[in-house]
């Protein structure tokens, strides 16, 4: 018989290879009994295997048995021999090491006539059971995530599923979907996502979908809801006396959500829910399983009992009777029977005296074989691999994002800065691996307690961030278009520089602040418009000393290069090439004339000449030039600045559209004058050669990173080594630009350091 089954399994494996499209379709659509009208080959395989099994083997297929931990080699061999001889349907691991589990899984897989389910109870990862693998935080910590980070739970589900698949595991008995509505609950607590049913439903669904995307069945547990109990079903049978209306409002919504999302399995708890069945535990109740779960909620997948060795069952039902009653109630899988042989004997005896029990055994066995066709056979030849350092790092990265999102140290840094009047408020946005992991807004637009609070829609004067979010981007685009080269002298495009001491200055030198241009001059006192100020810039003397000197003047000229080459003013060119196609509606020069309402714009300085500056560029030279210049004038919010930086980090692509060539981005974000001691890239600032805690960027940022800061209290930073985007916007210049308490307190770089510390853990 074993030889026959082996041939059938091999035949099914070959069929599975020829039907790869169905095998690899999304698992959220795989396990649905309505689809089990297959003419072939699946139905043929199930029928053939079922026909080849004796009654005892069919009953044994319904059982998943406990694998003892830390067995000797001799004990392991005897255990495998005994269980495979019985023909049990699967195994559940609870402790030990990954290598030992892999060894025993391979043995059980090779010795079984019908490939077994391998399962684990790994609610927070395989490290929950296998001491040498990674363990995620419990669900309650993920339940604290801000809504925009919910997808991190999906990522965890994917990672747990991936590691299960590597270890040859087909079932992971997760997620817990109990609502933590009773703080005195001794067994659920932090295993639950939340006390809010809607929150539990959303997060549990995300985890299940992530895990099932890797070919590992998820089980929603503990049906119909274990969250509001005061006793542990491992020790005694908890009793729930709530009305059906209460259960329908609190306990059942998460299960409905998981069923709608096509979760593969549901685990039934050992409870007594008097509103439905005051006589029997839920795990042994046809009213609960066939009535509520199957008929009312419409669940079509696998139903499994909680462990049948728990006192919630064994205190009343023993000697195989609990297993028989669980089968009659509608469970497909009998989990952890305390005496496997006795349970098989009792059920087989019932079959011989009751045709209804016989039909139940055949029906449940058939459903399990269908599940094996989808969850076991496609992976039968996959090697079992112990997850290594790469998987630990991937898991740790998810936890780092979790910790960043929940960090309170950052709140304290910002609160102290606001209290010290370093700024009235700010926006902070961090992206890691293309996802928003921190999106917070603090304080108000001014120090007035009646002023509006900062929101994600608040628009800030970016000051010198304009240099990289407008001018540098524009030049990158022109390089892509073949209209300029960084080695070109500015005078090639700006005739008024010919015959001056700036005639030979190149675009690369200006972008790198390596052109001997003055740092700043109050041109606005002598010039009254765009052209007159540019003439003053052209006439300004160069510094005698070579080397890097940060200069606004060069970017005033570069803005004019963009205008001359493109045929459009700088603001129009970047709007056409970047902002509008990317959907960045708040990123603009002259925001008041581009639909941004005044009340959404953070004020800057209370100027002695101009009065309160709000909605107009703060920089006086840019203001005199008509509010559009290459060095200042752009307004935006944190999310839109982050979008521009993420586009760069993603090689010039945003939402599937290419805006820049990746080679051009690499060209501009590398140092070109490092041998001359200049740390800067083209347009972008870089980490110091010798990082310092008091520098413009935190010491943890990599040498590959790049970014910029702005006079009004702004900062952006991109770190390719960490796949990280950091944006901080404030109006620290309100109401006076001096002193610069924001810089003195190292607010921005201290926040950066907190983020890097999590990523480096």
Image (tube, grey):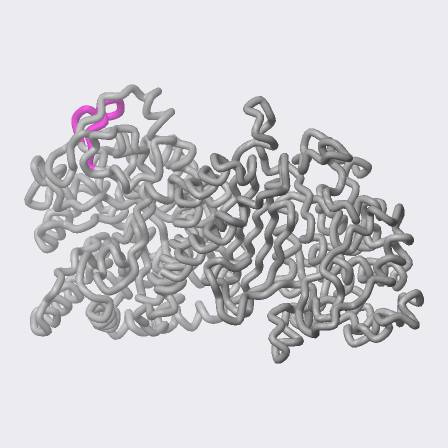
Location of residue 243 with respect to 644 vertically, above or below: above
Q: Nearer the viewer, residue 115 or 406?
A: 406
Q: Which residues fall within the magenta stretch?
A: 270-280
Examine the rendering and report whether any part of residue 211 can be seen.
no
* Residue 542 visible (yes or no): yes
**Where residue 509 sits: x, y (%)?**
74, 71
The percent position of residue 38, horizontal first and vertical second, equals: 46, 55
| Quadrant of the image occupied by residue 650 | bottom right
546 is within the stretch colored magenta: no
Residue at 38 percent across and 24 percent down: it is 249
Give the left or right position of residue 596, taking residue 224 as reference.
Answer: right
In the image, 134 versus 651, the foreground residue is 651
* Quadrant location, the C terminus: bottom left
Dominant secondary structure of the residues highlighted in magenta in the image: loop
Residue 247 in picture, x, y percent from top left: 32, 25
Vertical position of residue 342 compared to residue 97: above or below: above
Which image quadrant: the N terminus? bottom left
Quarter of image, res 330: top left
Q: Position of residue 97 (x, y in %)?
A: 20, 66
Residue 272 in magenta stretch: yes
The answer to whether 395 appears left or right of 432 in the picture is: left
In the image, what residue occupies the spot 23% across and 71% down? Answer: 99
Q: In the rendered view, tell whether residue 354 sits above or below residue 521.
A: above
Count every numbered label the image shows and give the total.
Answer: 0
The residue nearer to you, when weighing 147 against 700, is 700
């Amino acid at each position: 018989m074993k030889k026959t089954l082996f041939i059938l399994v091999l035949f099914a494996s070959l069929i599975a290879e020829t039907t790869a499209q169905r095998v690899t379709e999304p698992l959220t659509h795989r396990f649905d009994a309505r689809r089990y009208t297959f003419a072939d080959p699946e139905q043929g395989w199930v029928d053939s295997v079922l026909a080849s099994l004796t009654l005892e083997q069919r009953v044994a297929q319904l059982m998943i048995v406990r694998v003892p931990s830390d067995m000797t080699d001799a004990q392991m061999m005897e255990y495998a021999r005994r269980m495979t001889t019985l023909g049990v349907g699967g195994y559940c691991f609870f402790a030990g090491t990954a290598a030992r589990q892999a060894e025993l899984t391979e043995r059980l897989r090779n010795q079984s006539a019908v490939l077994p389910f391998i399962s684990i109870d790994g609610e927070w990862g395989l490290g929950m059971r296998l001491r040498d693998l990674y363990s995620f935080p419990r669900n309650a910590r993920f339940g604290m995530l801000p809504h925009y980070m919910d997808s991190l739970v999906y990522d965890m589900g994917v990672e747990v599923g991936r590691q299960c698949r590597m270890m040859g595991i087909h079932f992971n008995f997760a997620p817990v979907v109990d609502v933590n509505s009773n703080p005195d609950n001794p067994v659920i607590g932090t295993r639950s996502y939340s006390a809010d049913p809607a929150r539990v439903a959303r997060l549990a669904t995300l985890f299940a979908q992530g895990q099932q995307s890797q070919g590992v069945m998820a089980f929603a547990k503990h049906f119909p809801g274990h969250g509001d109990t005061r006793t542990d079903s491992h020790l005694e049978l908890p009793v729930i006396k709530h009305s059906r209306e209460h259960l329908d409002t609190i306990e059942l919504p998460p299960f409905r959500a998981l069923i709608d999302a096509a979760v593969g399995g549901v685990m039934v708890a050992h409870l007594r829910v008097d509103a439905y069945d005051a006589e029997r535990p839920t795990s042994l109740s046809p009213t609960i399983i066939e009535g509520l779960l199957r008929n009312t909620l419409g669940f079509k997948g696998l139903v499994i009992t909680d462990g049948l060795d728990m006192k919630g069952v064994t205190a009343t039902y023993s000697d195989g009777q609990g297993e028989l009653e669980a089968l009659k109630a509608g469970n497909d899988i009998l989990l952890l029977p305390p005496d496997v042989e006795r349970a098989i004997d009792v059920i087989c005896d019932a079959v011989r005296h009751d045709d209804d029990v016989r039909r139940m055994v055949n029906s449940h066995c058939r459903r399990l074989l269908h599940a094996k066709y989808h969850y076991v056979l496609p992976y039968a030849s996959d090697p079992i691999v112990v997850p290594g350092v790469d998987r630990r790092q991937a898991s740790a990265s998810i936890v780092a994002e979790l910790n960043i999102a929940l960090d309170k140290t950052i709140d304290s840094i910002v609160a102290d800065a606001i209290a010290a009047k370093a700024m009235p408020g700010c926006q902070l946005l961090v992206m890691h691996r293309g996802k928003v992991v921190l999106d917070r807004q603090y304080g108000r637009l001014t120090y007035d307690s009646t002023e509006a609070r900062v929101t994600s829609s608040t628009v800030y004067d970016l000051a010198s961030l304009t240099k990289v979010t407008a001018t540098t981007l524009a030049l990158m685009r022109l390089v892509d278009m073949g209209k300029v080269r960084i080695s070109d002298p500015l005078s090639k495009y700006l005739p008024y520089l010919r015959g001056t001491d700036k005639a030979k200055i190149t675009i690369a030198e200006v972008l790198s602040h390596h052109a001997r241009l003055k740092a700043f001059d109050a041109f606005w006192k002598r010039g009254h418009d765009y052209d007159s100020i540019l003439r003053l810039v052209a006439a300004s003397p160069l510094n005698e000393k070579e080397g890097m000197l940060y200069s606004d003047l060069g970017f005033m000229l570069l803005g004019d290069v963009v205008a001359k080459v493109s045929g459009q003013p700088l603001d129009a060119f970047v709007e056409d090439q970047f902002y509008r196609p990317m959907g960045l509606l708040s990123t603009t020069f002259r925001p008041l004339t581009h639909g941004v309402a005044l009340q959404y714009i953070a004020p800057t300085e209370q100027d002695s000449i101009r009065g309160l500056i709000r909605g107009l560029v703060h920089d006086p030279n840019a203001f005199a030039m008509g509010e559009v210049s290459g060095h200042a004038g752009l307004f935006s919010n944190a999310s839109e600045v982050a979008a521009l930086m993420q586009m760069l980090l993603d090689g010039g692509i945003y939402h599937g559209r290419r805006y820049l060539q990746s080679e051009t981005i690499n060209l501009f974000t590398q140092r070109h004058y490092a041998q001359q001691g200049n740390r800067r890239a083209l347009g972008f600032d870089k980490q110091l050669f010798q990082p310092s805690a008091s520098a413009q960027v935190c010491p943890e940022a990599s040498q590959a990173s790049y970014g910029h800061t702005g006079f009004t209290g702004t900062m952006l930073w991109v770190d390719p080594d960490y796949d990280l985007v950091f944006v901080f916007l404030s109006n620290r210049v309100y109401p006076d630009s001096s002193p610069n308490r924001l810089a003195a307190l190292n607010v921005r770089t201290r926040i950066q350091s907190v983020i890097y510390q999590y990523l480096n853990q």
